[in-house]
Image (cartoon, rainbow, N blue to C red):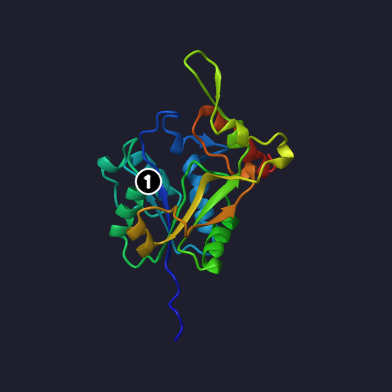
Amino acid sequence: MVEPKPHVLALIPARGGSKGVPGKNIRDVAGKPLIAWTIEAAQQAGCIDRVVVSSDDEAILAVARACGAEVPFVRPAELAQDETPGVDVVLHALARLPDVTWVVLLQPTSPLRTAQDIDAAVARCWQAGAPACVSVTEAQTPPWWMFRLSAQGRLQSFLPERQRPQRRQDVPLLYALNGAVYVAQTDWLRQTRSFLTTETVAYAMPAERSIDIDTPLDLEIAACLLRHRAGG
């Protein structure tokens, strides 16, 4: 018996209450609203069947519609707070969108992620027989070389000093979440309520596509890289 084709939803969460960069999801970045870069990548990905934006903000929803994304519901205000867990936003959407077997969470603050990254992350998940995959990038600063500051301003090693490698060549390769792509089988996600478990596999992305916009400087760097990509 032939297995039914998975129904893959791209879900783009974009609330209106950003404090670090006010209105960032629809700010102009290299000639387009920030969210448009993610909508276009999702639309171009071969594995995606449906592109939906979840937002509490009518201005964001209007831009999403203009970019060709679906906006079948308005996210309730209680799920658009600073402290709202991201998985709650996903589960809210899945409760309103039947027949979705896989969900791909794409944060609009990762505009340099490409359609090829989305397809590769989903393929990595399926080829590994894993219920989830998240994108990562090589960590720039090893945790052994991170410090706290005491009340007196003195350095306190974050990890035990005796474990600190003496040379960069001795540091094991480490990866950090880059926030660009989260893939999960929907029934599994409803049970675990997390994309990150011991069953999750990783898809590695280069640093130049792993910018996660949280500050005005991030916005400027992303715009520069996007213009360079377009040849401008």
Q: Is residue 77 above or below residue 50?
A: above
Q: Can you see residue 4?
A: yes
Q: Residue at x 29, y 46 (%)?
A: 75
Q: Residue at x 52, y 67 (%)?
A: 126
Q: Is residue 157 above or below residue 83?
A: above
Q: Residue furthest top?
A: 152
Q: Quadrant of residue 80?
A: top left
For the residue pair 143 and 220, the one nearer the viewer reads as: 143
Q: Position of residue 63 (x, y in %)?
A: 41, 44
Q: Can you see residue 141?
A: no
The quadrant of the picture occupied by the N terminus is bottom left
The quadrant of the picture occupied by the C terminus is top right
Near mark 1 (Cα within 10 A), the count class, few <14, some 14-19 or many ≥20, is some
The residue beneath circle 1 is 86
Helix, strand or loop at mark 1: helix
Q: Position of residue 207 (x, y in %)?
A: 63, 42
For the residue pair 167 and 85, the one nearer the viewer reads as: 167
Residue type, label 1: Gly
For the residue pair 95 and 49, the one nearer the viewer reads as: 95
Q: Position of residue 81 (x, y in %)?
A: 31, 37
Q: Residue furthest front?
A: 162
